[in-house]
Image: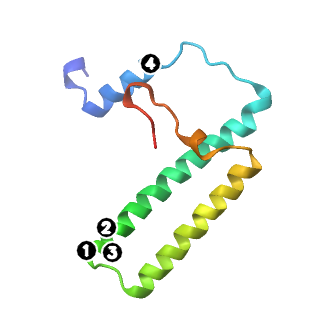
Amino acid sequence: MSADERRPSDLDLAEVANALPDRLEIDPDAVQQDLARLVLTVVELVRRIVEHQAVRRMDDGDLTEDQIENMGRALLELEKKLGEIRDVFGLAEDELNIDLGPLGKLL
């Protein structure tokens, strides 16, 4: 596939790859915390997407009152659990916002 035939997403990934350092410094003592940070970041991203979709569905009138109540309780519980896990690993909420280089911050 030529450079002209690449999809926009391929170009974005190439930009991110080029922005990354040639060598990564890996601290064996921090692997557990770094992995927790990555996993929590992905879960937080999914939580925000689900929350956004729930608000959109509420605004569109697609949810019953019971569904709205259940969704709200589930999202609050998930947010609480994420906070507990962040505390276990000593991570602040703002540490979950991974910098993707030219694409900007993830969250």
Name the residue rendered at 52%, 39% in the picture: 97
Kind of residue indicated by mark 1: Asp
Residue under circle 1? 60
Q: In this view, does 23 lie to the left or right of 12?
A: right
Looking at this view, name the residue that lies furthest to the left: 4
Quadrant of the rendered structure where residue 24 is?
Answer: top right
Kind of residue indicated by mark 3: Met
Q: Are marks 1 and 3 in contact (CB under 8 Å)?
A: yes
Q: Do the residues labelled 1 and 2 touch (CB within 8 Å)?
A: yes
Per the rendering, the mark at residue 19 is 4
Q: In this view, does 70 lie to the left or right of 78?
A: left
Across and down, in percent, residue 40 comes to: 60, 48
> How far separated are the C-alphas under marks 4 and 1?
40 Å
Is residue 53 placed above or below 40 in the rendered structure?
Answer: below
Residue under circle 3? 58
Looking at this view, name the residue that lies furthest to the right: 29
Kind of residue indicated by mark 4: Ala
Name the residue rendered at 74%, 39% in the picture: 32
Q: Is residue 80 left or right of residue 106?
A: right
Is residue 25 placed above or below 69 in the rendered structure?
Answer: above
Across and down, in percent, residue 104 comes to: 40, 32
If you read the primary sequence from the N terminus, does the residue marked by circle 4 or circle 2 appear first? 4
Per the rendering, the mark at residue 56 is 2
Name the residue rendered at 54%, 72% in the picture: 74
> How far separated are the C-alphas under marks 1 and 2?
6 Å
> How far separated are the C-alphas under marks 3 and 2?
5 Å
Disc 2 secondary structure class: helix
Q: Are marks 4 and 2 in contact (CB under 8 Å)?
A: no
Foreground label between 4 and 1: 1
Q: Do the residues labelled 3 and 2 touch (CB within 8 Å)?
A: yes
